[in-house]
């Protein structure tokens, strides 16, 4: 956890990377947002595109089975393809429901998200079973072709889908935790700390930008403790910071700022 990492840095007094990977990703994501509802809609659309592309690949795999596999295998493959279609369609329906709720009523439909996660898990399960049909049946050249073109969930799609889901959930949680007025304040800070000109390959420039943004959030939200804590919880990956950790972060921020002023 980010806060624990900061404590260890202070205890050892050694130069360490400022931001751990999870926290870095969340801050980068937050700094890229210009409109929360539109951001969610964009990632929802990306997810639907990935799911549709995944289904199209499995449809081509089904055609390959029909051409080269024994008829006894086809019934099982058809059942699995049908399951893949059903679960992918259900995922897309939940994504559409989530997007419509945000854009039309500014409400977070957590039931739809819960259903989305369930259908996604079923989709993964059916997809892996389908891939295993060819892995267990084909030999030599046909097997190599199947492995290259149709064993695709983990190699080509799952990471992208999960990244989009994690991003969409982060945006969704932000909308659920903050009022429209509070989100407007956040967007104002994001505009002031625009990341467009940041050289993300330069650790010092990245560090300075993160500190600037976090400090502005702290100044805006810390007087309202629940808002500051909820922000840190979101950025830390859903782990609620304890009072001592929050104080330690504040001291660490103050120390970093003083160090920079003394340079």
Image (tube, helix red, strand yellow):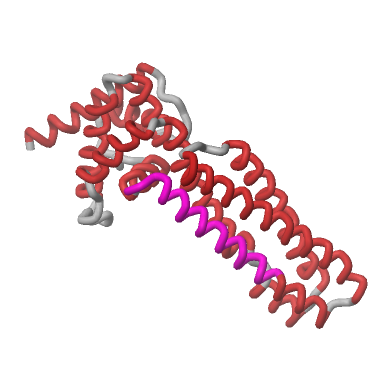
Residue drawn at 61 percent across, 64 percent down: 52
200 or 170, which lies in front?
Answer: 170
Kindly identify the residue that appears in the image at 84 percent across and 77 percent down. Answer: 69
Which residue is drawn at the image coordinates 68% and 57% (left, top)? 89
Residue drawn at (74%, 76%), measured in percent from left and top?
143
- The picture quadrant where one finds residue 181 is top left
Farthest residue toward the right?
A: 72
- Residue 142, quarter of picture: bottom right
> Where does residue 113 sit, x and y in percent of width and height?
59, 42
* Outermost residue, front side: 104
Q: Quadrant of the C terminus?
A: top left
Using the image, determine if residue 28 lies above or below residue 254: below
Residue 250 position, x and y percent, is 26, 24
Task: Relative to 233, say whether 168 is above or below.
Answer: below
Q: Along the line of sight, which residue is nearer the eye, 36 or 105? A: 105
Is 54 one of the magenta-colored residues?
Answer: yes
Q: Position of residue 73 (x, y in %)?
A: 88, 70
9 vs 37, nearest the viewer? 37
Count of numbered circles on the image: 0
162 lies left or right of 245: right
Q: Residue furthest top?
A: 243
Query: Where residue 256 sits in the image (x, y, percent)?
Result: 19, 32
The stretch in magenta equals 34-58
Question: Most prominent secondary structure in the magenta stretch?
Answer: helix
């Amino acid at each position: 956890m980010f806060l624990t990492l900061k404590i260890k840095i202070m205890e050892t007094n050694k130069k360490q990377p400022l931001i751990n990977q999870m926290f870095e990703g969340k801050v980068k994501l937050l700094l890229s947002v210009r409109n929360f509802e539109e951001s969610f809609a964009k990632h929802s659309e990306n997810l639907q595109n990935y799911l549709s592309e995944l289904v199209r690949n499995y449809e081509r795999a089904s055609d390959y089975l029909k051409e080269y596999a024994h008829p006894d295998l086809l019934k099982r493959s058809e059942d699995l393809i049908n399951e893949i279609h059903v679960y992918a369609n259900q995922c897309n329906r939940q994504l559409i429901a989530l997007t419509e709720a945000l854009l039309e009523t500014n409400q977070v439909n957590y039931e739809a998200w819960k259903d989305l996660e369930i259908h996604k898990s079923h989709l993964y399960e059916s997809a892996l079973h389908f891939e295993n049909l060819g892995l267990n049946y084909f030999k030599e050249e046909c097997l190599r072709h199947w492995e290259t073109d149709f064993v695709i969930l983990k190699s080509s799609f799952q990471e992208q889908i999960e990244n989009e889901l994690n991003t969409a959930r982060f945006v969704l949680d932000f909308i659920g935790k903050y009022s429209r007025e509070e989100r407007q304040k956040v967007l104002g800070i994001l505009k002031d700390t625009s990341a467009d000109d940041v050289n993300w390959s330069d650790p010092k420039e990245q560090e300075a930008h993160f500190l600037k943004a976090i400090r502005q959030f702290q100044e805006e939200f810390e007087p309202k403790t629940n808002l500051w804590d909820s922000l840190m919880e979101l950025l830390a990956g859903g782990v609620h910071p304890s009072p001592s950790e929050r104080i330690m972060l504040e001291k660490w921020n103050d120390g970093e700022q003083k160090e920079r002023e003394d340079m």
